[in-house]
Amino acid sequence: MRNPKKLVFIHIPKTAGTSLRLLLENNYKETERRAIYSHEGLDEQLATALNDPKVKCIYGHFPLRPAIAASNATVVTLFREPVARSMSHYNHYSKRINEKHAKLMEGIETPEDFTKLVQSNNRQTAFMSGYLNQTEFLEDKGVLEKALANFDRLDAVGFTEHYAASIAYFGEQFGWKNTLIEHHNSGGKKKEVAAKAVWESMNGYDLPLYDQAIKRFAGILKGYEGRTPLVPKPPLLHRVKGYLRALSSKF
């Protein structure tokens, strides 16, 4: 494993990454972490964070860019079964919870419409192949091979379907003191689903990518199934106050 004191978490949308992001915030001080969720000047943002000795954890919706690949940072991500990820992605965007989502979803009312949105197609392959421009990504017939080759640059991989084991694995690898899972951003009430073939049409690359990821990385998680989460002790002052309250209740 590369430098464990410089962790880069590639947060692929709708892979339970928001829950993991909250764990990162619980395990690293604010001054030690850098969240990057804007692609404006992305490579410069990444280079600055990678070269800052105070930053121990970098995370956000960014692909595996050359600056990351060339660094000595430890790189991790979460994968999710592609059809389930696409359904979750569609349900999330359909809420139009912000101006960006509302604009992207103009004229899109069904999963069939959603297939026309470039951001809906093969997102996991796009992130692993390093592409920023989704249109250019879709025009490159060799992206799956590029994404699979970049598996060699991943130091630890988890899966949404094996989330508890994934967190236990990450916690052990990186010395986290808190591995208590909180589920967030789950999507709420589901909208109607289309035929499976519609979802599969958005994931021509992601389906084989996910199969290869399972074959290569999932086996290590078996040893982490059923692990008891680590929960940090509250500050000493809180514990003393709790002890005194408990003591006083006995009289």
Image (spheres, rainbow, N blue to C red):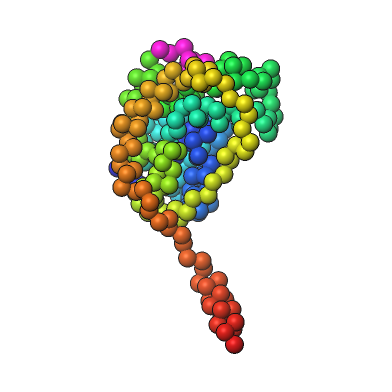
Q: Is residue 13 magenta?
A: no
In the image, residue 153 sits, relative to residue 106, either above or below, namely below
Q: How many marks?
A: 0
Foreground: 187 or 143? 187
> Residue at left 34%, top 25%?
148
Quadrant housing residue 188: top right
On screen, residue 218 above or below 192: below
State the residue at coordinates (40%, 18%): 143
Q: Is residue 70 visible?
A: no
Q: Is residue 34 left or right of residue 142?
A: right
- Residue 21 vertical position relative to residue 13 in the rendered view, above or below: below
- Relative image position of residue 130 (x, y in whole percent): 43, 25
Residue 136 forms part of the magenta stretch: yes
Nearer the observer, 70 or 104: 104
| Magenta stretch, main secondary structure class | helix
The residue sitting at 34% across, 19% down in the picture is 145
| 57 and 107: which is toward the camera | 107
**Residue found 45% across the figure and 38% down from its top:** 160
In x, y percent, where is residue 132? 49, 24
Image quadrant where one finds the C terminus:
bottom right
Instruction: Please say whether residue 160 is visible from this viewpoint.
Output: yes
In the image, the segment drawn in magenta is 135-141
Most extreme residue toward the bottom, as rendered?
251
**Image check: 55 left or right of 184?**
left
Task: Please state, as top left, top right, bottom left or bottom right, where the N terminus lies in the image.
Answer: top left
